[in-house]
Amino acid sequence: MIDTALAVLASSASEFLQTRTGWKVTSPMVVVGPPVPDSTGMQGVSETVTLSLLNIEEDRVNTAQGMMVRTQTPDGDAVQRAHLRLSLLVLFAAHFPNYAESLRRISYVIECFQAKPALTPQNTPGMDPTLEKVILDLFPITTYDSSHIWSMFGGSYLPSVIYRVRLITIDANRPVQPKIPVTQQRRDVVNGAV
């Protein structure tokens, strides 16, 4: 799910940038990868915007209360683990030799998600319907935090923006334990079956 969510974000931002710049390019303008060139094959990140995953957190506000939920199955009721809702911190970084162009591209990314802060299968063609809804919030950081982020990646600062991406749902969709309905358990006890 995380890779699917990042791919749809990169695709949406790429389409928006192509529209704003008017360039007809065959390669994506936003790619998923590390924010600085390294030895993993991301050498060609010049003149692109990269989308990188910074952190994964559980979204406890939007997660069902309790670890287990009761669901109905053809075989009766079952207890199942609650959906796990995640928040991702993602970084968009512009890689252009011209600093002004880097600033322009980051501005376009911000415009893209200001115009469409929630991505759904209805408003985003090609989006995996299992994602349901992906919400982006601009994530403010201090200069101190920015310094740590860029030193963590081992690179110099690039014009960039960080978003919190909410409501990535992980659901193994497997019942944990079948459960006999309470009314059936009570009848079995009364009749001496248990």
Image (cartoon, grey):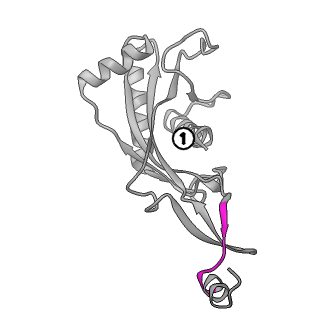
Mark 1 packing: few (<14 Cα in 10 Å), some, or many (20+)? Answer: many
Q: Is residue 4 above or below residue 154?
A: below
Image quadrant in which the N terminus is located: top right
Seen at 24% across and 23% down, the residue is 143
Q: Nearer the viewer, residue 118 or 78?
A: 78
* Amino acid tagged 1: Leu
Side of 104 where 119 appears, left or right: right
- Residue 161 colored in magenta in the image: no
What x and y, as percent, mark residue 85? 49, 51
Q: Quadrant of residue 161?
A: top left
**Looking at the image, how many numbered discs can be counted on the residues?**
1
Q: Nearer the viewer, residue 134 or 186?
A: 186
The residue that disc 1 covers is 9
Side of 74 where 88 appears, left or right: left
Q: Which residues are magenta?
A: 176-183
What x and y, as percent, mark residue 118? 46, 53
Seen at 67% across and 61% down, the residue is 175
Q: Is residue 61 above or below residue 112?
A: below
Q: Quadrant of residue 45?
A: top right
Seen at 56% across and 24% down, the residue is 33
Q: Is residue 152 above or below residue 123?
A: above
